[in-house]
Amino acid sequence: MNGHENHGSAKTYIMGFLFSIILTIIPLWLVIQHVMSKSMLTVSILLIALLQLIIQFFFFMHIREGEKPRYHVMALVLGAVMVFTIVAGSIWIMTFNSQVH
Amino acid sequence: MAQSVTSMDTRHEAHHDTFKLLGFWIFLVTDCIIFACLFAVYAVLRTHTDGDLTGHELFEVKGFTAETFILLASSFTSGLASLAMHKGNKKQLMAWLAVTVLLGMSFVGLEITEFAKMAAEGATISTNAFLSSFFTLVGTHGLHVTFGLIWMIGVMVQIGRHGIDHLTKEKVTIVGLYWHFLDVVWIFIFTVVYLLGVM
């Protein structure tokens, strides 16, 4: 193995695991306790899920690794654009569809 | 001469590996798009419950919370497996992979129990539009996990036979990436389906 390769260490895995547990308990607690209005709650737990996704990508999937140019990051960014378009676009257009409500 | 050939070979191999890994990342992106479509359908149909049998009545906090923690833990243990592999510790690698497989199996077991319970209450895939999209989305993820389990057991058999070599290393890395990806998808199922469902 090359010296400069980095596969994460026990420390980063444990940190990632702790973060992901905390980021699971917080939204669960928020929902069970009903601490905010419904729309605020929805936005908050979606943001926490996004944070959780970033944690998984950096601590577990080692997204910053690999040879440059980082084609896998480019593929992922393209994927994110498509996912956003499909999900947000579907919700947006169906909101104005009188047939489904 | 011989030396230069070997060094060219390794360089060629390293190059080849990068593209194999890139290919797998591209597969993960296409899988992301499949799940995005299923999430979009669910988001649109989640209110179409035709009266009763809503998520609020059907989802049990205890059950999906347990599933979430089991999957998070299995993602962590599969990370520890790849760490053991890079240290060259075969015994530890096999042990962490075995723990990951056991956690994955209990996840699938819990999910099947949950589905069976819902079906017993009359909530099947054909009951209403909400349940059709629910079972399709969560079931597709469950199938992915099941496939990942079979794959991981297959990799374990190969490590048992050949030990940690260039090929098995690559296989552990790729199946680990797949497993972390399933965890990422579950985070969104946990948030969008279950948490918004019981809200």
Image: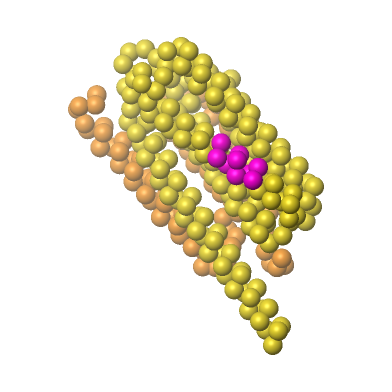
Q: Residue at x 79, y 52 (%)?
A: B89
Left or right of B49 in this view: B81:
right
Q: Color of chain A here?
A: orange
User: Looking at the colours in the rendered structure, which chain would you say is drawn in yellow?
Assistant: B
State the image coordinates of residue B188 (x, y, percent, origin top left).
Answer: 48, 36
Against B71, residue B85 (above or below) is below
The answer to whether B76 is drawn above or below residue A44 in the figure is below
Main secondary structure of the magenta stretch:
helix
In this rendering, would B184 be left or right of B197?
Answer: right
Let me know if residue B79 appears in the view: no
Front in this rendered view, residue B50 or B123: B123
Question: Which quadrant holds residue B64?
Answer: top right
Q: Nearer the viewer, residue A25 or A1?
A: A1
In the image, which residues are magenta? B146-154
Task: Pinpoint residue B105: horizontal percent, then vertical percent.
Answer: 63, 32
- Asked if the stretch drawn in magenta spans residue B126, the answer is no
The residue at the point 71 percent across, 65 percent down is: A1
Looking at this view, name the residue that lies furthest to the left.
A98
- The reply, left or right, for residue A84 in relation to residue B93 is left
Quadrant containing the C terminus of chain B in the rendered view: top left
Residue at point 69% right, 51% down?
B158
* Residue at position x 56%, y 47% in the image: B178
Q: Report the front residue among A88 and B52.
A: B52
Percent from the top left, x then y, of residue B132? 37, 26
Regarding residue B103, the answer to whether it shows in the image is yes
